């Protein structure tokens, strides 16, 4: 019998467990052995009385390790506690699969080294984009390519909130509560709505894609709290939607990486990615553009990614097939750039209370690059869309004209 130990049995852990149970006959056929959960570690054992009728449920890692797992699956959350657990498990020579992006974004480098030293596999497909296979394609299917850029909607909770606001003008707080009830949001949902979750995922993907170490803390991150209902109304009126996009580009000067709310055409790949769905677009030299889309959060979708890592590790446990943990990883840290290096269209908006002389000057200053303007009395805001201009030049023009009031001028990139 191949034994699986589990850390955490919430949304993701229970989804994984359901898939594992359902897969028994196939596993037996493929590996000529059964794959069973030998124990589950949680914090409050009392909450899991039903599960305890089927397997060992404990709040002690030592106890779980006494049941001699071959593989440990982690789906708890946070960094410090999970890091200690990961170190203990991996140092005991046990393969490790995790859904925890906070852990991988913060401690991935150390853990990969530890796994390598202990000759065990460390996999974390579920840490990015929930149920969508993204890391494995980058790691295994695109090795003949140089990847130049990644872009994605990679936070299901914020996409769900923006979709509901677009569809029926729902209230931010009400929709966040529903996303929490559906198991999409993090234990602390500020990391969803403030863009940190997407930032961590972008760092994990980019590190893998470009073979360099991208520190998520250097990424420019802006969440969705500042997106107003009038921003969404304006976007709708010109055929766009507001989406929280995570974008990175590998350039000669460093990796540009940012998470910001952007305008996207409603009929584009990102424009049709609504609710809890995620989409990741990869540009690579040999294959061209690839788009992966599907459910970015939730029990079974995320459980499916965890399960796929489990089968990957089973290949090692049963057949001795061993692969490098990270074929691409191991490069040096690269500078992280915060200004979009390609010229782009932009949405500029400001409150009607901004000095009227300034607003005329602002609008006039973009006439050379072309602009679309909209104003609606109920918005109490002025919006215009510029033609192509670089982020640096855009900000420079705004600063020169609005001076101290530049902070009152909001910009959105139009992502094409
Ligand atoms: P939940 O809050 O639903 O479940 C967490 C589980 O972990 C609970 O069983 C909890 O036990 C247990 N747990 C928490 N801390 C500890 C600890 N220190 N030691 C032992 N057990 C602990 O979380 P999710 O399932 O939603 O998320 C789990 C991980 O997966 C997170 O890292 C999350 O970011 C990631 N993830 C989540 C996705 C989702 O759709 N929800 C998608 C992709 C990744 P108890 O109930 O006793 O507190
Ligand atoms: N809270 C995350 C999200 C879960 O909403 O995308 C999936 O990583």
Image (cartoon, helix red, strand yellow):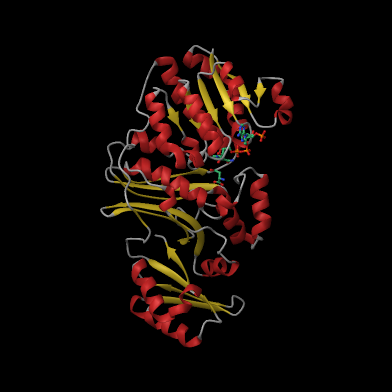
- Residue visible at 55% across and 68% down in the picture: 231
* Residue 271 image offset from top left, x and y in percent: 49, 56
* Residue 243 image offset from top left, x and y in percent: 50, 58
Q: Quadrant of the N terminus?
A: top right
Q: Looking at the picture, does residue 281 appear above or below residue 2?
A: below
Q: Is residue 74 left or right of residue 395?
A: right
**Which of the pair 326/94 is nearer the observer?**
94
Q: Is residue 308 left or right of residue 233?
A: left
- Residue visible at 32% across and 41% down in the picture: 211
Residue 389 visible from this viewpoint:
no
- Residue visible at 33% across and 65% down in the picture: 343
Residue 415 visible from this viewpoint:
yes
Q: Quadrant of the C terminus?
A: bottom left
Q: Looking at the picture, does residue 59 appear above or below residue 256?
A: above
Ligand 1 quarter of the rendering: top right
Determine the image quadrant of residue 168. Answer: bottom right
- Residue visible at 64% across and 59% down in the picture: 172
Q: How many marks can you see?
A: 0
């Amino acid at each position: 019998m191949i034994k699986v130990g589990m850390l955490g049995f919430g949304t993701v852990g229970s989804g994984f467990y359901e898939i594992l149970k359902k897969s028994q006959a196939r596993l037996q056929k493929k590996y000529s052995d059964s794959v069973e959960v030998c124990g589950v570690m949680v914090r409050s054992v009392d909450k899991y009385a039903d599960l305890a009728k089927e397997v060992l449920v404990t709040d002690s890692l030592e106890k779980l390790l006494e049941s001699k797992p071959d593989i440990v699956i982690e789906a708890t959350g946070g960094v410090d506690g999970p890091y200690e657990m990961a170190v203990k498990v991996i140092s005991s020579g046990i393969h490790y699969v995790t859904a925890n992006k906070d852990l991988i974004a913060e401690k991935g480098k150390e853990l990969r080294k530890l796994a390598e030293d202990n000759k065990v596999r460390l996999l974390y497909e579920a840490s990015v984009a929930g149920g969508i296979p993204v890391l494995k394609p980058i790691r295994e299917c695109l090795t003949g390519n140089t990847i130049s850029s990644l872009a994605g909607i990679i936070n299901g909770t914020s996409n769900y909130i923006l979709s509901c606001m677009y569809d029926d003008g729902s209230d931010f707080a009400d929709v966040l509560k529903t996303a929490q009830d559906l198991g999409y949001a993090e234990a602390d949902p500020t990391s969803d709505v403030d863009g940190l979750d997407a930032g961590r995922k972008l760092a994990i993907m980019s590190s893998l894609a470009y073979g360099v170490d991208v520190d998520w803390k250097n990424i420019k991150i802006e969440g969705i709290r500042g997106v107003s209902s009038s921003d969404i109304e304006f976007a709708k009126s010109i055929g766009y939607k507001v989406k929280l996009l995570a974008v990175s580009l590998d350039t000669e000067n460093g990796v540009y990486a940012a998470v910001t709310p952007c305008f996207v055409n409603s009929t584009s790949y990102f424009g049709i990615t609504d609710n809890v769905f995620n989409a990741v677009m990869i540009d690579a030299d040999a294959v061209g553009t690839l788009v992966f889309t599907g459910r970015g959060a939730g029990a079974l979708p995320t459980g499916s990614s965890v399960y796929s890592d489990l089968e990957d590790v089973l290949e090692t446990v049963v057949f001795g097939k061993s692969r490098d943990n990270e074929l691409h990883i191991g490069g040096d840290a690269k500078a992280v750039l915060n200004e979009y290096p390609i010229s782009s269209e932009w949405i500029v908006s400001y409150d009607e209370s901004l000095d009227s002389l300034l607003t005329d000057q602002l609008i006039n200053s973009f006439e050379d690059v072309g602009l679309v303007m909209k104003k609606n009395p109920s918005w109490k805001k002025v919006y215009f869309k510029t033609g192509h201009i670089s982020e640096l030049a855009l900000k420079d023009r705004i600063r020169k004209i609005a001076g101290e009031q530049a902070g009152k001028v909001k910009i959105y990139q139009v992502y094409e």
